[in-house]
Image: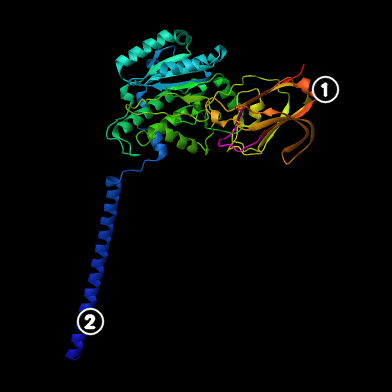
Amino acid sequence: MPPSRLSILYLIGVICVFTVIMQILLFLFSKSFTSCRNFEINRIHQEEIPKRVTYKDYLERPSTDLTKLHENWKREATILGKFPFEKKFLTIGIPTIRRIGDEYIMGTIKSIVNYTKPEELNGIYIVIFLADFNETWTTDISKRMNETFSELISAGTLVVIRSWETFYPPLKKLKNTYNHSYAQRKWRSKQNVDYAFLFLYSKLLSDYYIQMEDDIYTLPGYFQAIKDYISTFQSEWTCIEFSELGFIGKLYHSYDLEKLAKMVLLFYEEQPCDFTYLYFNIQMLQFRRIIRRPTIFQHVGLKSSLPGKIQPLKDRFFDNSEKIYKGDNPAARIYTNMKVQDGESLSPESAYSGEPGYFWSKGNGKTGDWFTIVFDDPQRIEKILIVTGSREHPEDSIKHGKLHASLSLVAVEASRPRCTNDIFLGYFDNGNIKVDNLTSVLGPFKIHCVGITLTENQDWWIIIKEIAVFIAD
């Protein structure tokens, strides 16, 4: 074989061997690299990236260690009154702390008690949580409560409790949210834990729980208003609000309190409870606020429990909705072309009903707006009184309007009654009108309709607080 051919074969052989060796080396390197890469990824996941904590996990071990609450913690927390053992209808929870310069808690308790009937007191607990660790203040306020409300405390209606500092998570190095100062973040974070402690204490005491602040007052009939409003709901609900402000007057089923407490603790340093409860309601599949209007609790405090903060908040829907004149008001249907707000207690029928409530239009009154009462049966009427505006909203009265009666009803067309044979009765004066001695004017004739008509535009909405119709003997 010629030398040139041998050289070529030799070269080809060397190349083949080299190629095989390179393939083996590449295979071994790739396997080693993959192994190292997988090891590194696992190390990063295991060592550098913490395990994701789910919402459910966090609820099972929230920021405050609930295992610190031993079996008899509620008895130890009770410092005045009997530890509640009988399940009742409603628990009213009120946390309070020391305020510099002003104090509202005693007035708040008095307002609630004074406007609760004796038989209604048997259906409630009032739980006052002294959430301040100042021993001098705690001793002083406890003594005054014991002296002022001794009968309620002895009866077990009023219960005063306190907590321990060990229950609270660290209140240092709190997250900076909402551009709040450090003092405000610390105040609201502690307040969240205060609420949670109160929820946990109260969760088995009653069917329902309502949250209050220590600077509110209420109205006569508030307890019955709560019961009546609850009874109107056929579908499931999570939270009913009896004040539109903050965390005042929020009613929950007691069986939801532990879940609410855990969620408040979950976000104790992120946001105030005023926000958290709204998210809780959504988690519980209530996607809109349910506010009873008129509301029945009003904020009265000026100085906040946060030192240096002025809090002049007022609930615009709060008013005394009790009827004054309480007419005979025979059965009737009510019609109006004024815009109607949501809520049964602000409906047109509320002005005529003998129950607490009034009609509050949604929008300014306009010339020609009307409000008509159509009696089921024509009536001989002696007197009519109509009151508009209210104590909280005197400007929402009828400034320019007239009252007339109709002897006949032709028909009701498109939700508007056609009443005829009208008799002018008078003009509104300072928001009110009173017409009496009607039998001497009308003689034997009976009235089928009573109508109000606005004669000029108004700058405000319209409140018709009470319509009292007195029939002739």
Q: Is 111 on the left-hand or right-hand side of 398?
A: left
Residue type, mark 2 in image = Ile
Q: Local crowd at mark 2 within 10 Å, few (<14), some, or many (≥20)?
A: few
Q: Main secondary structure of the magenta part?
A: loop
Residue numbers of the magenta segment:
454-465
Q: Residue at x 21, y 89 (%)?
A: 5
- Which SS class for mark 2? helix
- Which SS class for mark 1? loop
Residue 444 numbered mark, or none? 1
Task: Read off the residue under disc 2.
Answer: 12
Which of 81/331 is in front? Answer: 331
Q: Is 456 on the left-hand or right-hand side of 75?
A: right
N-terminal of the pair, mark 2 or mark 1, is 2
Residue type, mark 1 in image = Pro
Q: Position of residue 325 (x, y in %)?
A: 64, 19
Q: Is 96 on the left-hand or right-hand side of 30?
A: right
Going by the picture, which residue comes out furthest to the bottom? 2
Q: Position of residue 359 (x, y in %)?
A: 61, 30
